[in-house]
Image: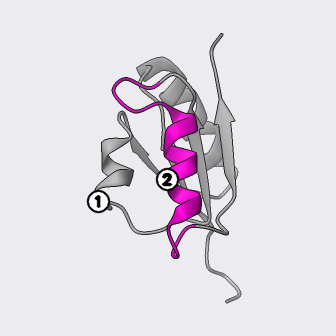
Amino acid sequence: MQGTKQRILVVENDEDTLFLIENGLTKAGYVVETCAAASGIVEFKHPVPDLFILEKDLPTIDGIAVSKFLRLQTATKATPIIIISGR
């Protein structure tokens, strides 16, 4: 649909990094949802976005495990995923 903004879900546990990513993407015209832990994705607390940005070193469930989980789900198997790391 024309005029519909792309939605991005950012999962990042560092508040400063999350703020910078969210602020930059919002200014670029994206609708950004955020969460600090991967449990929100695994429990399907967010609608499927157009893109996932996942921190590699998340507490409890890391970004790599979440990306593998997303690839196994029918609704998210084709959704692009970007893995980021502060290391």
Residue pointed to by mark 2: 69
82 shown above or below 31: above
Which residue is found at the position 51% from the left and 39% from the top? 65
On-image quarter of the N terminus:
bottom right
Q: Where residue 49 sits: x, y (%)? A: 53, 65
The disc at residue 45 is 1
What range is drawn magenta here? 58-76
Residue 27 painted magenta: no
- Distance, label 2 to label 1, CA atoms, is 15 Å
On-image quarter of the C terminus:
top right
Residue 68 painted magenta: yes
- Work out whether residue 75 or residue 20 is closer to the camera in this orientation and state it: 75
- Work out whether residue 27 or residue 61 is closer to the camera in this orientation and state it: 61
Which residue is found at the position 40% from the left and 33% from the top? 61
Q: Amino acid at mark 2?
A: Phe
Q: Nearer the viewer, mark 2 or mark 1?
A: 2
Task: Find numbered disc 1 in the image and state the secondary structure of the residue it sits on.
Answer: loop
Which residue is found at the position 40% from the left and 68% from the top? 47
Dot 2: few (<14), some (14–19), or many (≥20) neighbours within 10 Å? Answer: some
23 shown above or below 58: below
